[in-house]
Amino acid sequence: MSNYNVSMRQNNAVALMSRIREKANKLIISELEKHGIEGIVPSHGEILFHLFGGNTYTMKELAEKIHRTKPTVTVLIDKLVDYGYVTKEKSLEDNRVTFIKLTEKALQLEPAFQDITAKLNSLVYCGLTDQESMQLEKMLYIIHQNFEAE
């Protein structure tokens, strides 16, 4: 690992975040393949993460939870339906509302997702103290909020 010059601001935070995201996505894809999981891509991860909690969500709720547009979530969900990981059920009270539920096939993925998450977290937080980890998360949250305000 190379030492990073912290004596002056480099103005490359976005470039670093982009490279980190790219490497994280490559790791996720590689780990999914190692676990024999087909069809899942990193963008499905947040959806499955929320559904692994045991709740049923509407498309709108999932879109809000993962900060994506409803049309984007619809495309992601349709792919998960094609692979047999989720089902879509229309609300009996309001035909415009669709509920998303995990299938048994998807529930079997949870241990692999926990392993992949643990590996990602070990890389992200490696070499950081608990205080530094909390500072990192706080700084990333502030940056995220700055973009939300735009």
Image (cartoon, helix red, strand yellow):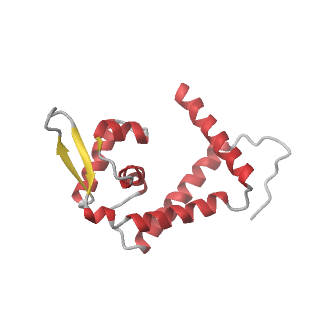
Farthest-out residue, top: 150
Seen as rendered, the residue at the extreme right is 7
Q: Is residue 145 above or below residue 45?
A: above
Image quarter of the C terminus: top right
Choose between 10 and 94: the one closer to the eye: 94
Residue sitting at x 39%, y 52%: 53
Which quarter of the picture shows residue 35?
Answer: bottom left
Q: With respect to residue 63, does 39 lie above or below? A: below
Name the image quarter holding the N terminus: bottom right
Residue depicted at 29% across the width and 40% down the height: 59
In the rendered view, does 96 fall on the left or right side of 110? Answer: left
Is residue 59 found left or right of 12 in the rendered image? left
Along the line of sight, the residue nearer the viewer: 139 or 9: 139
Location of residue 42 in the rendering, given as x and y in whole percent from the top left corner: 43, 56
User: Which residue of the protein is positioned furthest toward the front in this rendering?
Assistant: 54
Looking at the image, can residue 150 be seen? no
Q: Residue at x 47, y 64 (%)?
A: 114
Instruction: Name the quadrant containing residue 106.
Output: bottom left
- Residue at left offset 59%, top offset 54%: 20
Could you tell me if residue 15 is visible in this image?
yes
Q: Position of residue 118 (x, y in %)?
A: 54, 64
Residue 71 appears at what percent x and percent y?
30, 38
- Total number of numbered labels? 0
Q: Position of residue 62 (x, y in %)?
A: 35, 41
Q: Is residue 91 left or right of residue 12?
A: left
Query: Does residue 40 appear left or right of residue 3 in this picture?
Result: left
